[in-house]
Amino acid sequence: MRRAPDMDWENKELGWAVEDEDGILADGASGTKERSHPVAATSGRRIAGAALFAFLSALYVQKAASYTIPAIISMVSGVDRQAAYAKYDSSDLLRSAVLIVTGFICAIVAGFLARRRGILAGVLSNSPWILLLGYLLFASVVSGNPSFSKFPLVQEDALDNWFLFGIFLRLALIILAGWVGGFIGKRIYSPDKDLDAGHDKATIFGVRWPHYLWITPLVYEAFFCSAIMIVYAGAIALLAILSFAWHPSLWFSVLAGWILLPIIPLVFYLAVSLTAVGFVRFHKAMQYTQTSIRGWKRFWQVLLYGVAVPAATYTIAAIGVDLTHAMPKPVPGDWKIAVGLAALFVAINAIASGVSRLRGQHS
């Protein structure tokens, strides 16, 4: 027998409560048994449902990435949207990175929702991609073999070894993403964080599962697009700050040092905070157990936090990206001055420390 996940060796009236594999609580003092919380035990249906929800969410994350990443490419390269979409579609590296990252994140979700056997749920959430890549690897290996010529996607000529290695690497990484993501999801799970505990209806994160038929395409996809743009805005904002620190030619620029540099982090913080607040309040409005928000009030809150907020934060993050791109370019080679100044400060500090020690010895 093992400890109950939601009653970890809780001291009851007459003894200690212990849960067996069937989810039955046994009172250590009285010897009586009672059924533990109905959601405490994990069934195969729960694991399969968690994996399916995570996989469908991953599809919408990838769809959001197919919209947002070309928009970022267009902003960076100065090309139109059509050319940006063509660049994204032709980049195996970008699309593979999106597949692996989304598989990893959604495997964490699957492992958390499954409560137990998180690794299994994480791998199952990536199983369609694993099966597809596994078959592509098989078809690539047997290409050129007449015995397998009737199989789909099998080529008449043998394929290059680097092509085979690329498919194998993607397959290995997506399996690893599912395994590690499911493990992390299981590790971060606790009954205190379980929004589905105690519900007499099937819920996902406290929301009745039929609602996700419209939440995922209408709300989650918008939040996914906003999140991708915010991550990019934060990354280039950090690079801009580091560039300012290591290029003395920017220190005396009014536009860089006095206008853009203070505004860019504020814009990023505003986008992040609004996204977090909107996402949390949207979910609070959709919770199965809440009774304070009903009717038109609930409709307007869903519209505000689920539609208006992600659209606004996407725009704010895009403005942050434009502001960062507007930073002046440093003078080539001026970083050497920054390195020299840093070395000078280190030398002065070392000399001052040595002088202080000598004075201490003489005194």
Image (tube, helix red, strand yellow):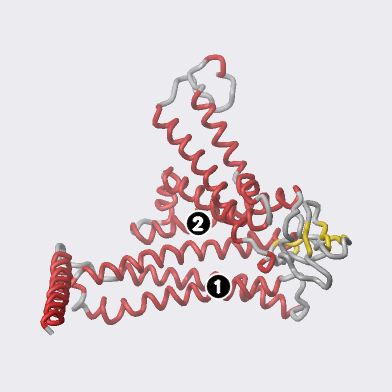
* Residue shown at 64% from the left, 60% from the top: 216
Taking 88 as reference, is 185 left or right? right
Task: Find residue 53 and report its horizontal and vertical position in percent.
Answer: 67, 53
Question: CA gap, disc 2 to disc 1?
Answer: 21 Å
Taking 147 as reference, is 260 left or right? left
Residue 207 visible in rendering: no
- Residue receiving disc 1: 276
* Residue shown at 39% from the left, 31% from the top: 162
Q: Residues within 10 Å of mark 1 (few under 14, many from 20)?
A: some
* Residue shown at 55% from the left, 53% from the top: 63
Task: Find residue 149 and report its horizontal and vertical position in percent.
Answer: 55, 19
Q: What residue type is labelled 2?
A: Tyr
Outermost residue toward the top in this view? 146
Taking 93 as reference, is 199 left or right? right
The answer to which of marks 2 and 1 sits earlier in the sequence is 2
Task: Find residue 152 and report its horizontal and vertical position in percent.
Answer: 58, 26
Examine the rendered structure and indicate whether residue 301 appears above or below residue 163.
below
Q: How crowded is mark 2: few (under 14 residues within 10 Å), some or many (20 or more)?
A: some
Residue 325 visible in rendering: yes
Query: Judging from the image, what secondary structure is the residue with disc 2 in?
Result: helix
Task: Find residue 327 and report its horizontal and vertical position in percent.
Answer: 28, 71
- Residue receiving disc 2: 67
Mark 2 touches mark 1? (CB < 8 Å): no
Examine the rendered structure and indicate whether residue 180 appears above or below residue 30.
above
Q: What residue type is labelled 1?
A: Ala
Quadrant in the picture for residue 74: bottom left
